[in-house]
Amino acid sequence: MLPRIAVMGRPNVGKSTLFNRLAGRRIAIVDDTPGVTRDRKETVARIAGRDVLLIDTAGLEEAAPDTIPGRMRASSEAALKAADLVLFVVDVRAGLTSADRSFAQWLRRHSKPVLLLANKAEGREGAARALEAYELGLGSPLLVSAEHGDGMGELHDEIREALPPEPPEENDEDEADDNRPLRLAIVGRPNAGKSTLLNALLGEERMITGPEPGLTRDAVAVQWTDETGKPVRLVDTAGLRRRARITQALEQMSTAATIAALKECEVAVLVVDAVQGMDEQDLRIARLAEREGRGVVIAFNKWDAVEDRNAARRKLEDVLMASLAQLKGVFVVPLSAATGRGVENLMPSVREAYALWNRRVPTGALNRWFERALERHTPPLVDGKRLKLRYVTMPKARPPTLLVFGTRAEQMPEDYRRYLTNSFREAFDMPGVPIRVNTRGTENPYADESDG
């Protein structure tokens, strides 16, 4: 029986948009009018590498049982009873309402795992407003934009952690976990050699290749066992062009499939043409992977055709240092997909990047680092008052994520956030891994303002 995931929340917070986004296709009607969804909609969807039954529910409303809203609520209650996981959606643009608080309290009374989704959280302002959702007592909110697809990679990761484990087929639980495939996407510009690299890894002509850009039009997944005997789910993708060059409908769909594969993967191999060097489009793809929190490895392809290798390597390092500081120390593997030279070095780097991406730092070591970091560089003044940062936790990995607590911590300037990120990266030797530094003020949100 497939695990069941119910999407719940008051009307017009974006539940159906999220449902369509997770399903990968438009199933539920989406409109700005509250109450468009009245009946539960169900579909089998592939989320976090698993098949699940996804349920879109009507908006939760307080109403008499014999009214339409009352029957809609009863339908949602039935979905909750059958669910293995609830995605509770709030609208950060509108702010928390009494209905949000009422239904959060209702959910807390049920013994169901709940992920709190702060929807419509695009941009810095949305992230700041999302902090209000902590008041609901449902844990840390996940910042997403169902309309634009922001935060879907992290959501897939959290769903994977929250769902009950898959029943093993032949192996015991430990072996089943070891045999879960690493999800690896091969991305890059058209004609960089992505399909040729996939063929080189597989040792067979699995993908059509040639000098013409755009031969691969869809994201193609291949199950593979690497040289260590561990499973990998390889996804070869269409080349990502600059947005201005994406015109035909087919190419638009190819681009959407590529971005979806990037959001689904755990590590992305960015294939760069070493003869041409890393250009602005390569950097855009790397930044997209970093924003989605994916591990990144650069495959510096066509290395056999490079005449001055020292110069090419220096140029690449300069570009990375100047334009991709958020992935400082990213693994770079020179190789030739066409001849196979250097390809054997790629998967060890992928496995190392994956291990760092999964790594958790013990609380004691984390706070010792934090104290030293504050001593070396005192938190700055903001509006004439110094930030008082008190302690740090690591609520999750995949990617490593820090939560800094302190008085007015949410006002931390970006340059100090970058300082903490780089200090953490160096202290715990995490090159090339996206690192998140989130903040939370220590004032009591329930305190009466007149008392303080």
Image: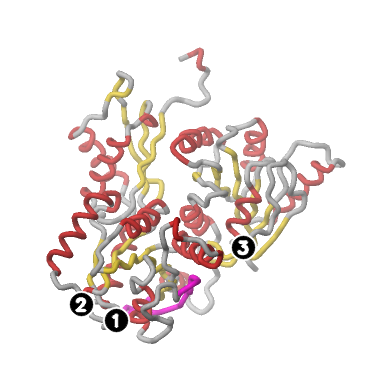
Q: Is residue 127 above or below residue 111?
A: above
Question: According to the image, label 3 marks what residue?
Answer: 3
Q: CA distance from mark 3 to mark 2?
A: 49 Å
Question: Is the residue marked by circle 1 packed among few (<14), some (14-19), or many (20+) residues within 10 Å?
Answer: some
Tag 1's secondary structure?
loop
Residue 304 marker: 2
Q: Which amino acid does the dot numbered 1 rest on?
A: Ala
Distance CA(mark 2)–CA(mark 1): 9 Å
The residues tagged by marks 3 and 1 sit, at their Cα atoms, a distance apart of 43 Å
Which residue in the structure is indicated by mark 1? Answer: 338
Q: Amino acid at mark 3?
A: Pro
Up-down: is 128 above or below 289? above
Q: Which residues are magenta?
A: 216-230
Tell me what residue is drawn at x 41 percent, y 71 percent: 178
Which percent across, then down, holds residue 278? 27, 61
- Disc 3 crowd, CA 10 A, few/some/many (<14, 14-19, 20+): some
Residue 229 in view of the camera: no
Q: Are marks 3 and 1 in contact (CB under 8 Å)?
A: no
Mark 3 vs 1, N-terminal side = 3
**Mark 2 Cα-neighbour bin, 10 Å: few <14, some 14–19, many ≥20:** some
